[in-house]
Amino acid sequence: MIVFKDVSFAYSARQRVVCNLSVTINKGEKVCLLGLNGSGKSTLLKLAAGLLMPGNGHVLIDGDATDDQRAALKVRSQVGFIFQNPQDQIVATTIESDIAFTLENLAFPPDVMKKRVEEMAQRFGLIDLLKRHPEAISAGEEQRTALAGTLAPSPSILLLDEPTSFLDYAGKERLREILFTDATTILAATQFPSEALQFERVLLLDQGQLVFDGSADALFTSQTWQQLKTDSDAIQTTKKKQYSASAIGDRKESNVIEAENVSFSYQAGTDAVREIDLAVSTGEIIAIVGSSGSGKSSLGLLLSGLLTPTAGIIRYPSNQEGDRLVGYLMQFPERQFFADNVHDEVAFGIESEQLPVNESKARVADSLALVGLDYDSFAVRSPFTLSGGEQRRLALASLLVMNRPILILDEPTASLDWQGTQQLLELLHHLRRSGKTILILSHDLDFVSRVADRLILLDKGRLRWSGAKFATDFPTLLFESQFGGLPQPLQQARQLHREGLSPIEIAKRLLNDQSSESGDLF
């Protein structure tokens, strides 16, 4: 049982995140924590785990207060916690030893520990990766490793912060089967209304306050939900700025990237990318999709010039270097943060232009506004105090301010709420119209189906298929096997194409449909 009694928490005098919250989660309940970016979900989970202590009120785990040092070991031995970023909890040098880490700390006998590690590796599809270093696996595989290590000691309470963010379809199905077939108490945070339907109970947070507690069906027909949608839409309308040339550029020159027979290995015998041929043209939006470990991120790093091919060659136009053409959004945006505050983080990209202070500030403010971050509210904050979704927006703003002609975005929707996802869709359409070339690396086929011109499917480092989403030879069965079916936007796009609509008309239709559904179950 988890009990919050009049709990409040603030990171600073100006940043109160949880406000006078009281709620009880009973033993064995599966509860979803739903809310927009910055609503307090991650903070509430850390309070429940005893990683943060309430400023006011108390958090109780089976009757023991998390701030009672005498009960600290008892409380923490009952709780399993999954961070929003799985890298935050991977500590060992092999997948096998990382899964065993908590078991070792809890003094499990060696024979029991070995059995548990093998069992968890089997359940999460990690058997073939046990001897790998965590740096040599994909983000989805890292998330499965974190889940396996957390579940290995069989905690009675699971606290999960966006546990599906980096999981592909198969990984999500596997997690769902594991979580909902035992008596474990679960409190899981998500940005997505569709995921809330899996839970028997939903808690909705809005600006640190609990505004709804009940079933998902009751929530989505409630006045509270309709008001939240109305308020968030109003905020979006207020934040929207004109997409000016100073913010996103107006480049029309050819900036084709060509990859010829490109392969890459992180270590001997492990090929991340195998014999890839690819041409990227000006103004295209290309989605590189595939399951976890398929080579998406590795290919993105190669095309950006951040990795050098083991074999083959990548050509850029006019003998320019990749790092002068490409802006790269990493899968984990905090990896690319280094400044003390948001303003300096974004402004660093244009320091070499030696702009007047007022002009530099305007460029920074414009770039932040494009991703839905208000300059006055965020400029002085540390990037490391932002929520996962806010960090992703900040990382994108840091790319936009530099006005690079090519953008490579690795899992850009991870940690974004439904409001941020809609805004990203609109921004990508505007970037395309300005002449930008965009590559999206993602397992979110629903999202990329709305915006991409061309889909490239990778499987174990090899190119399985490449073509337009409208292509007559589109391999429906292959995509269904990889993603558990074709998402509604892809089906709709293909149907509209058969009805004679142009690609531009189809893109507008899909964008408008997403806008109308952005607070709904999509």
Image (tube, helix red, strand yellow):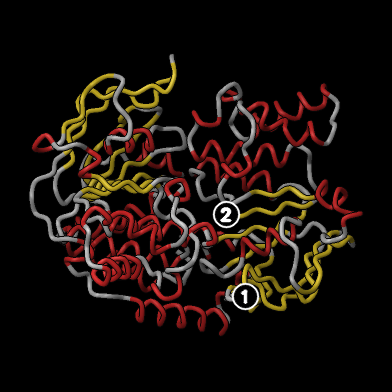
Q: Which mark is residue 392?
A: none
Q: Residue at x 38, y 31 (%)?
A: 459
Q: Amino acid at mark 2?
A: Glu
Q: Residue at x 66, y 72 (%)?
A: 18
Which x, y percent locates residue 366?
29, 69
Q: Amino acid at mark 1?
A: Ala
Total residue callouts: 2
Which x, y percent locates residue 222?
58, 81
Q: Which mark is residue 162?
A: 2
Which of the pair 91/28 is nearer the observer? 91
Please tell me whether residue 70 is drawn above or below residue 357 in the rendered image: above
Please identify the quarter of the rendering in which residue 418 is found.
bottom left
Tag 1 residue: 13
SS for callout 2: loop
Q: Residue at x 22, y 58 (%)?
A: 354
Residue count near mark 1 (Cα–Cα under 10 Å), binned few <14, some 14–19, many ≥20: few
**Image-based side of 321 in relation to 328, left or right:** left
Please identify the quarter of the rendering in which residue 154 is found.
top right
Labels 1 and 2 touching (C-beta < 8 A): no
